[in-house]
Image (cartoon, grey):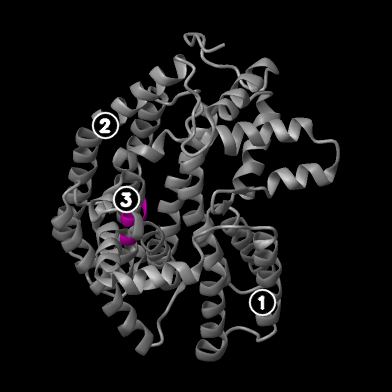
Amino acid sequence: MAILGYFAFFLYGRALNMPYHDDILDILKFVLAMHDSQSLADSLAAVFEQYNDHRTGASRLVYYSLFLMQGEVDFRTITFVANLALPLLALLYVSSLAAEARRYRLWVLVIGLFILCQPRAYGLVLWAMSSFAFYYVCFYAFVTLHLLHRPGLLPFVGALAAATACSFSLASGQLIWVLGLVSLIWQIFALRNRSVAVLPVWLLVSVAVLALYRYQFSSPNTISAMLIYFWQTPCHHIGYFLAIVGSGFGFDHLPISLAIGVAVTSFIIWVTGRDLLDGRLTALHFFTAFMLAAVLVIAMGRAPYSNLDYALVDRYSFASLNILLCALVLWLNRGVEVSVTRQAVLLGLAMTFSLASYRHYTPLMDENRALRTEQFERGMYWVFGHPFHDTASIVRRAIELGIYRPPDSSTSS
């Protein structure tokens, strides 16, 4: 509660009721489209409209629900709801502990909160649209795989719903259908604790959701194009992947991040191989594979256009934090005995990392926050790659209609 309380206080003092870049198009423009819709078809078109390489319908439904409850778009509220995913993810790690490791539940919960509830990914923490996308694609994927490993019809239906939400949070969320399929095949043919009847249902829903996602979808970042880039510079792509995996704990140092990435990835491959041979694959193994695959997608999409140090950008570090937590729980689930001394040492390291992150990244967050405030108060409602006139008119119209009310200190209105 102390960790969560301080993080909430930290957010309360810094959250801004100001749209930032993608917030303008993915939140304000969407709410305006819902306001202008004349039919159910118009509303559905607004929910499923493509945004860059993504469809963010699951997040948009939450934005609109919050708008209906409050009567306005409040970016502070959206920020708080987005960050709720962090303690929920920590609870999912606790629920992933094997029976023989459940005595470490409180210990894992506290470590998870120390690692997740701090400003390491400072660019996401106060950025409503991006925090929803990055945080909840992980949360929905974890929920999907967790429910798929529980018996019964209701958990299976819940898994289908969570996988659909995952797909419509971030482009990488589409990977959940592949990981879910592999998970079901493992349970049916290796563990023999699932009916084969669930396979055609999973495949049917996955085809329907992916077809809906791809309907009238266009993007230059096709799979074939990314593979061509990969074969041209494979070492650069692999280094990019490893740097992201280790970036959460490298404190912006590329060699350290690469070393951590190599160590963590190697450990996960080793422990997964052992558990595969022992027939002990669990939902956490498949979630870990999802996280690594998501990082690989980021590397494939970004590596051709940027230097290796761009892999250390703060928002990518969120995947790194989760991958390390995956590695920790996978290690505990091997049945290792962790002495009280080792527990204290690891807890101390997690606390030290959290405090160091607050110290190192809070000034960067505050600098970014000050820049956002200055730009907004000057009426600079811009989004990279889009005409300023279009994005500015969205914000101004939302203000005129009372859909969005800027802070009193703002001169933008």
Percent position (x, y) of residue 110? 31, 49
State the CA–CA distance, disc 1 to disc 2: 45 Å
Q: Nearer the viewer, residue 102 or 111?
A: 111
Q: Which of 263 and 339 is in front in this view?
A: 263
As drawn, the label of residue 203 is 1
Q: Can residue 322 be seen in this view?
A: no
In the rendered view, tell whether residue 107 sits above or below residue 300.
above
Badge 2 density bin: few <14, some 14–19, many ≥20, Cα 10 Å: some
| Residue at the spot 54% in from the left edge and 57% down from the top edge | 140
Give the residue pinned by disc 2.
Answer: 364
Kind of residue indicated by mark 3: Ser
Give the residue pinned by disc 3.
Answer: 317
State the CA–CA distance, disc 3 to disc 1: 32 Å
Kind of residue indicated by mark 2: Leu
Q: SS class of the residue under badge 1?
A: helix
Badge 1 density bin: few <14, some 14–19, many ≥20, Cα 10 Å: some
| Residue at the spot 49% in from the left edge and 29% down from the top edge | 382
